[in-house]
Amino acid sequence: MSRVSETRPTIRDVAQRAEVSLSTVSAVLNATAPASRATRLRVLAAVAELGYEPNSQARNLKRNRSHAIGLIVPDVLNPFFALVAEGIGDEVRRRDYVLALCSTDSDAAREASFARLLRARRLDGIVHLSGTGLPPAALLELAGGSPVVTVDERVPGLTGPFVGSDNRRGARLAAELALARGHRRFGIVAGPTGLWTAEQRLAGYREALAAAGLDPDTVSTIRGDYRLESGRAAAATLLAGKPARRPTALLVANDLMAIGCIQHALSLGIDLPRDLGVVGYDDIPMATVVTPALTTVRQPARKMGRVAAELLLDGIDGHDVPASVDLAPTVVERDSLVEAVAA
């Protein structure tokens, strides 16, 4: 048996210890060719005995890989995006990749700048969550040669895999629940103009109201930016009238804005949920700790992130991946919506 190297063990040392060729060791460690069970066990035993650690940098250069992917998100302080990022991180770590996180603050210029930066870094692929609904030119160029997976927000021009949930159906379910509770005077707090998610949710609310015989064009609708403060501002407008003319239920396009609505309503002395019901969207962790606890539409955010990472990494490895994965939304009933008493 050969003498073990006194320095860091090499793949040649492993081959000599296991009494196999260098190509066989490489095939076993990289799963690039079949090997018998006995051969695999000999190679893995030699690796363990010698304490051999593959040179991942050299391996990646040989494969023209960085073994790193980028993630562009609108706002890491938004719990929904944070959960998506956690799901991506779970899968990235499992597959031994590095994740480069870029938060754009929903700013088109920053989004474009990060796309250019990630393209220059020659990462293996990108997961993109848009905060603007616009495709940065650098990202379109990147998508022409590297895998790009979009999550939650559909972006024109990006034709790679998409992972999301049925926003229109989720919003329709939320409005139908409020209607079933006897509510007939509504206010809507929609998301930003131009975002696909915002338009889909608004369409879902309007469809449900129209199906119940209400004219959605007569329902007061305020646009927010998916942040807490814009929920407070929207509620200030929607709840400014006399009590007899106020909405008895607010349909709100995400949980942060819904929580802002609840905070402002409570500051006015409105009895929640007796005199005002609120339904959010996303089911972030804060939905369970606000008072009253928020009835909302659950998006499986962490699963969306994990699936997006799976699609991206499978695509990098050359596997066929589906063009779209749509996960079902569900309504989670808590305390912020009860039977209407003054509809």
Image (tube, rainbow, N blue to C red):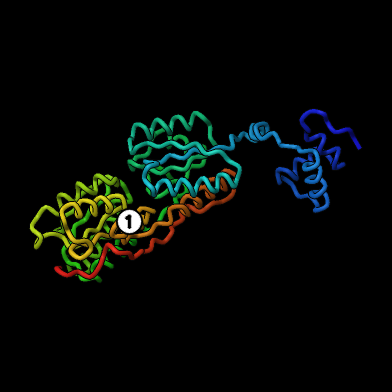
Residue occupying the point 31% across, 46% down = 195
Residue at image position (17%, 63%) is: 275
Q: For this view, does 285 lie left or right of residue 267?
A: right
Quadrant showing the C terminus? bottom left
Q: Is residue 310 above or below residue 327?
A: above
* Numbered label tally: 1
Q: In the rendering, at what x and y percent does residue 115 appear?
A: 43, 33
Q: Residues within 10 Å of mark 1 (few under 14, many from 20)?
A: many
Q: Residue at x 61, y 42 (%)?
A: 96
Residue 153 in the image: state x and y as whole percent: 37, 48
Task: Between residue 250 and residue 164, name the one nearer to us.
Answer: 250
Is residue 267 shown left or right of residue 152?
left
Residue 239 found in image quarter: bottom left
Residue 274 location (% of width, % of height) = 20, 65
Label 1: state its secondary structure: loop
Position of residue 278 relative to residue 43, above or below, is below
Q: Which residue is mark 1?
A: 281
Choose between 91 and 169: the one closer to the eye: 91
> Which one is in front, 144 or 341?
341
Q: Position of residue 101 (x, y in %)?
A: 46, 37
- Left or right position of 270 against 3: left
Give the farthest residue toward the right.
1
Which of the 4 image quarters holds residue 278? bottom left
Residue sitting at x 52%, y 47% = 309
Q: Eyeballing the image, is 339 above or below 133?
A: below
Q: Quadrant of the N terminus?
A: top right
